[in-house]
Image: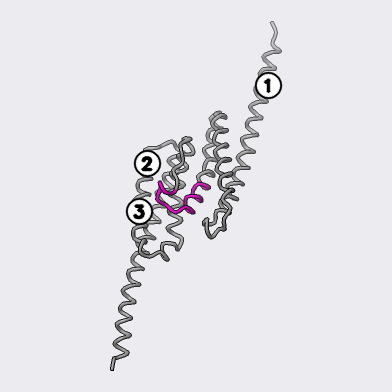
Amino acid sequence: MTNPRGDLQGRLEAVRSELGGVHAAREIGLAASRRAIRHAGSAIRAVHRGNRELWAAQLAGCEAAIREAQEALAPFPAVAHAGFLHDAEKEYAEAVLTAALVDGDVLPDHRALAVGLPAWLNGLAEAASELRRELLDRLREGRVDVAEQLLRAMDDVYELLVGVDFPDAVTGGLRRSADSLRAVLERTRSDLTTTVMQVRLQTAIERSLGGSEGP
């Protein structure tokens, strides 16, 4: 006759061992994801400052942390989809895509970045929102033409995202990100329009004064 207590004790040890592995992977993935998010934030700030050397260094740190988290969590899909890895991948995508949008480069897709598609889509939405700061900086420099190019890029991204008509459970809450981008886009369009009208008015006044000057 078997010993139920001994059998249960053996099962308990197996359960503890398995859960210990899950917990250890979660701790590694969580810490790495937090590092990735910090690096991504620094990389985005470096883009706005025009410091691409710092951007590249911070992006490398971000990617290394992402890969560490992905590797640790790969055997445990339930933990991998808890949310923190998605957030880290989204921030990594945002850091890459912000630089690409500012430079007018081709945007790498989610496969090239080795991140989930929902993370890429939401990262793209946030990258387009980051263009507002870049656009306002260019306006302060008097570079209206560059500001207009940035607004077109924001428009293009928004049009792409609103065409992704799937439930939030599939897209990782993309509808909310797109709505936030629309609000930023409209404020930015208003700011740019006001500046353009002011420039045109000033130019017209200067021409009028110049034409009225006689000998």
* Residue 142 location (% of width, % of height): 56, 28
Region in magenta: 110-126
Q: Of callouts 2 and 3, which one flags the residue occurring earlier in the amino acid sequence?
A: 2
Q: The residue tagged with tag 1: helix, strand or loop?
A: helix
Tag nearer the camera, 2 or 3: 3
* Relative side of 177 to 16, left or right: right
Q: Residue at x 37, y 41 (%)?
A: 56
Between residues 47 and 209, which one lies in front from this camera angle? 47
Q: Which residue is mark 1?
A: 204
Q: Which residue is mark 3?
A: 67
Q: Residues within 10 Å of mark 1 (few under 14, many from 20)?
A: few
* Residue 185 location (% of width, % of height): 60, 43
* Relative side of 196 to 115, left or right: right
Q: The residue tagged with tag 2: helix, strand or loop?
A: helix
Label total for image: 3
Kind of residue at badge 3: Arg
Is residue 125 on the magenta stretch? yes
Q: Residues within 10 Å of mark 3 (few under 14, many from 20)?
A: some
Residue 56 numbered mark, or none: 2
Is residue 119 on the magenta stretch? yes
Kindly report the secondary structure that dominates the magenta region of the rendered protein. helix
Q: Residue at x 35, y 53 (%)?
A: 67
Q: Residue at x 35, y 72 (%)?
A: 19
Looking at the picture, does residue 163 appear above or below residue 22? Answer: above
Kind of residue at badge 2: Ala
* Residue 154 location (% of width, % of height): 56, 40
Between residues 13 and 203, which one lies in front from this camera angle? 13
Residues marked 2 and 3 touching at CB (< 8 Å): no
Q: Of callouts 1 and 3, which one flags the residue occurring earlier in the amino acid sequence?
A: 3
